[in-house]
Image: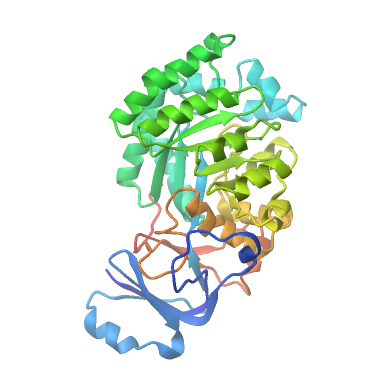
């Protein structure tokens, strides 16, 4: 079915020619068309422009099943792209949340077998069909809040079978969900208790057993490592990235969340698509990123929830870097996949201008998923993942009016999205 959206108050993030990312001062620019229209056919954006130039009768004549949506002075923008989530998980962790309130750190909880290891134990117990159904419900939840594409990581298995269980669920989600989904193998998310003191043996298990099975089942688009204080070393990270590259899995890195770890430099060295978290980033990390094709990605939800320092996002952009923002949706350190909240945090906590925040949650985070040629902006030929907002006065209102759902209608793959859960 073809869709014609007319009387759009402001069409946001438009491009005459497809760009893969925006960086530095470019992030202050948000291309828009006021009083506009947008035409969608066969799941793709076919055309757009000013209302004064719309030949509406011609569309009625050519497309007999044409669906007309009168935006009624509402705005239209590309759906959010969330390039970092762990939304396939078996249970919430609100009890550990209470421990954090009482003063225990993320590292303290991890050392006593909580955190990721707690979820890993429950992952071994949950039936695969239950894990799938619960995860599908979370996808509906984030889609209703404006997310049209999402990367989902494994990493709560930490055994061969549990990691494969997670990745099989993600593969099934790809098949049934209207969202665009990428899978990321994160066997190196934490060190199982039985491997404490012999970390190299667990890295060997990842390289010699997990990666070949993941590749054989075509279960992952990317490979990831938590390269940070108390987790995996730079040497571990490089070994895992090299092994993944042999099977065509491009690297992505959890880096510098807890300290200066060398993870950013390791990611750049191995041409990682993104390095994520980045609470601890200095001049050396910025210089390395400036010489690379790696997207620095900040996860405001995790820093906010854990009470950590905030990544120097303003410094990175002012240095000329691109920047992406993602939710880190997971049960332990960021239990929300609401990208509208991330958009607000970008301005409130990180001092990004609204234009920079919108670029960071659409086109740049699409780049961090390797899909900015298909998603992240309004351009001819791109997939029609579209938000029609509620009536709002300006696009600056999007990050300003935090806490409320400003999405009126979602269109995914050229079809109006109706949540099932």
Q: Position of residue 354 (x, y in %)?
A: 65, 64
Residue 188 percent across, percent down from the top left: 51, 25
Which residue occupies 59% across, 46% down? Answer: 297
Is 253 located above or below residue 102 in the figure? below
Q: Nearer the viewer, residue 248 or 223?
A: 248
User: Which residue does the image show at 70% across and 44% down from the upper left?
Assistant: 311
Image position of 279 (left or right of 132)? right
Q: Relative to 124, is 305 on the left or the right?
A: right
Q: Residue at x 57, y 41 (%)?
A: 275
* Quarter holding residue 16: bottom left
Can residue 328 be seen in this snapshot?
no
Numbered circles on residues, count: 0
Q: Is residue 201 above or below residue 365?
A: above
Picture quadrant of residue 168: top left
- The residue lying toward the viewer, choosing from 17 and 108, is 17
Does the image show residue 314?
Answer: yes
Farthest residue toward the right?
103
Is 328 positioned to the left or the right of 411 in the image?
right
Residue 166: image x %, image y %?
Answer: 40, 30
Residue for point 38% across, 18% down? 208
């Amino acid at each position: 079915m073809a869709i014609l959206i007319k009387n759009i108050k402001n069409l946001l993030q438009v491009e005459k020619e497809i760009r893969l990312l925006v960086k530095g001062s470019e992030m202050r620019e948000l291309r828009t068309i006021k009083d506009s229209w947008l035409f969608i056919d066969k799941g793709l954006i076919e055309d757009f422009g000013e209302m004064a130039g719309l030949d509406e009768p011609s569309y009625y004549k050519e497309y007999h099943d044409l669906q007309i949506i009168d935006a009624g002075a509402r705005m239209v923008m590309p759906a959010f792209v969330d390039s970092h989530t762990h939304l396939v998980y078996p249970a919430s962790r609100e009890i550990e949340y209470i421990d954090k309130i009482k003063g225990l750190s993320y590292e303290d909880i991890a050392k006593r077998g909580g955190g990721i290891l707690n979820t890993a134990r429950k992952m071994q117990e949950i039936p695969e069909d239950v894990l799938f159904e619960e995860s599908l419900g979370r996808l509906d939840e984030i889609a209703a809040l404006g997310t049209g594409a999402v990367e989902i990581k494994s990493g709560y298995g930490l055994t061969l079978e549990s990691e494969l269980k997670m990745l099989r669920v993600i593969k099934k989600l790809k098949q049934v969900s209207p969202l665009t989904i990428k899978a990321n193998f994160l066997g190196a998310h934490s060190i199982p208790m039985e491997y404490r003191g012999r970390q190299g043996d667990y890295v060997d298990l990842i390289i010699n057993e997990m990666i070949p099975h993941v590749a054989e089942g075509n279960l992952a688009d990317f490979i990831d490592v938590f390269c940070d204080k108390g987790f995996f070393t730079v040497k571990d990270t490089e070994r895992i990235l090299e092994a993944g590259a042999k099977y065509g899995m491009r690297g992505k890195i959890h880096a510098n969340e807890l300290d200066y770890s060398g993870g950013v430099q390791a990611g750049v060295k191995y041409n990682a698509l993104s390095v994520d978290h980045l609470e601890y980033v200095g001049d050396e990390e910025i210089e390395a990123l400036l010489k690379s094709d790696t997207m620095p990605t900040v996860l405001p939800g995790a820093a906010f929830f854990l009470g950590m320092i905030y990544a120097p996002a303003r410094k990175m952009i002012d240095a000329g870097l691109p920047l992406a923002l993602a939710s880190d949706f997971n049960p332990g350190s960021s239990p929300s996949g609401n990208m509208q909240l991330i958009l607000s945090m970008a301005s409130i906590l990180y001092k990004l201008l609204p234009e920079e925040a919108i670029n960071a949650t659409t086109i740049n985070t699409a780049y961090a998923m390797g899909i900015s040629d298909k998603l992240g902006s309004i351009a001819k030929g791109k997939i029609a993942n579209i938000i029609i907002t509620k009536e709002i006065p300006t696009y600056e209102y999007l990050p300003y009016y935090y806490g409320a759902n400003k999405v009126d209608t979602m269109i995914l793959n050229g079809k109006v999205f109706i949540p099932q859960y």
